Amino acid sequence: MKRSTKRLILLLAALPVAVLLVGVVYMELMDYVEGVPRDFWTSIEWAAETLTTTGYGSDTHWNDPWMVAFVITMQFLGLFLVFLLFPVYVIPFFEEHFEARLPSALPAAKGKRYVLIYRYGPAVSVLIEELARYQRRVVVLEEDEETARRLHENRLEVVWIRHDLHELNFGNLGHAQAIVANGSDQDNAALLLISRDQNFVGPFYALMADPLHRQPLTTWGVAAAYTPVHVLAAALASRASRRIHPSVQGIQQLGQKLGVAELRIHNTSPLVEELLSHTQLRERHGIVILGIWRSGIFIPRTLVDTPLQAGDIIVAVGRQPALEGLGRLAVPLSQRGPIVIAGYGKVGRKVQQILTAAGEKTIVIDQTPGEGVDVVGNALDRETLKRAGVDIASALVLALSSDSESLFAATVIREFAPDVPLVARANQQQVVRRLYRVGADFALSVGQVAGQLLASHLLGEEYIELEQGLKLVKLGASGLTGRHPLRAGVRERTGCEVVAVERGEEVVVEFPDEFCIEAEDTVFLAGPPQALDAYYTAFQVKRSGIGED
């Protein structure tokens, strides 16, 4: 029985008792205080009229002050009960009985098989979007009812765990293609054991909070276990330090040899006021410019028809040495002071550990004093930033747990220290663009990290997502073998572009006329998601991830 039903039954039982009690008290008071006796049913009628605020008949006048006080009290009590009755009892009752019922059992064998995701959160949000884009069926197994209803309203398939994970009927688990566990480490382990007991033989992927818990899951048959928070921390640390490979702030590696750099142009850079089409970076340096971030808006290269400006963030693809040269061309600021870390939660603590292991000096800001915290204070406070030496820092890593706080802190820090490289974490993917808008040099969300880790397994796609409308994907050469990368009609037929080809130990970015793609080559494509989808179809490229059925 639902909680609202129980409360409504309790209310219906309590109302007659309340009317009876008030009626009896009124009958006795009228007899002994007012001196004008009332019979039982007249008293009950008065009590009902008063408590329901419907008004009185002929019984509307009293002389004794105590009697008047009692009547006034009952009138206000009745008014209070009416206002309490509907929002607390009646409305919840109708909401629960007329709202959509959440499924409480796994889907049966009808339609396409599905990827089962246990517990929704920022870490799996990007993955769900990617699976939906590739028309993969997704079922979310959720314990929180409010979250389950929100996902259901957003047209996601949801199974609500009403009681305990162990009590759920897993009889239809065999229809799942793969399982992605995003709960607590112990719940992930329990789900893994339950799935194996149900003879589930598909791949099981787990997102862990503690990397030390990977070994038991590996023993029990997990396909892969990742710690996205630690991967995110490592990515942020590598952007802040030149001592961590790669040595240019803003480089993301795709494979062993090709990287993507996001580099802010300093006001002393020779690139300022240059037209992107005139820089000839591809011909001179072997670098392909995919676009720029300007005022938090990503502008693809094909739409950039204005001179580059100080503060623009160039998004470039190339080999690491070439990207390092571009970094010097963009005039990165020299290392001066220590690296400041704002926030000492799981991400901030791991960033500090990685930087310290690399030999970097760090200063940690946090509002809670404790071991490892150097400056106690709020990162939104200019005085705190001054005490931490942010204005002379070689870089600042924003590792705050709240996206709203990170956005505000980035704004404050950029005004306080406009030249300090600013690296920021985000929980939600959509916040990344806003962080760029307020002045971050590099921003990355935990959803992007987890999505990229799992996409290669589930979709057969290794990629870097530069923003929601642009991806760089690493693929095999099937479909382009024997063709010139720029004359195979890739852009004309799909809207994406071949930006590099990896051949053995060499990465080719500038393609001579006689260059042809070989079967063993690796191709790197850049373009929006829908264009990449069109490439798979137009050139008959098959993904290596899980199938659609």
Image: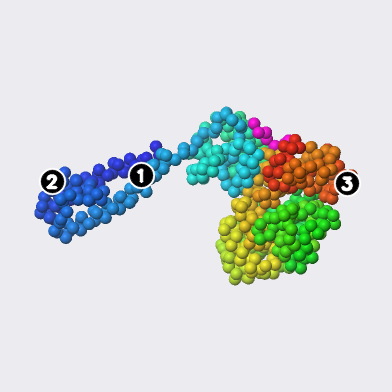
**Quadrant in the picture for the C terminus:** top right
Residue at image mark 2: 39
In the picture shown, does residue 312 fall above or below 180? below
Task: Give the residue displayed 61% in from the left and 35% down from the top.
Answer: 114
- Whether residue 27 is visible to the viewer of this picture, yes or no, is yes
Question: Which amino acid, mark 2?
Answer: Asp
Q: Residues within 10 Å of mark 2 (few under 14, many from 20)?
A: few
Residue at image mark 1: 90
Q: Is residue 195 left or right of residue 231?
A: left
Question: Which amino acid, mark 1?
Answer: Val
Give the residue at the far top of this rendering. Answer: 109
Task: Give, as a single range, the part of the protein colored magenta.
Answer: 541-549
Q: Earlier in the sequence, mark 2 or mark 1?
A: 2
- Mark identifier at residue 513: 3
- Mark identifier at residue 340: none
**Quadrant in the picture for the N terminus:** top left
Residue 63 locus on image (x, y percent): 13, 58
Element assignment for label 2: loop
Q: Is residue 50 left or right of residue 471?
A: left
Residue 33 picture quarter: bottom left
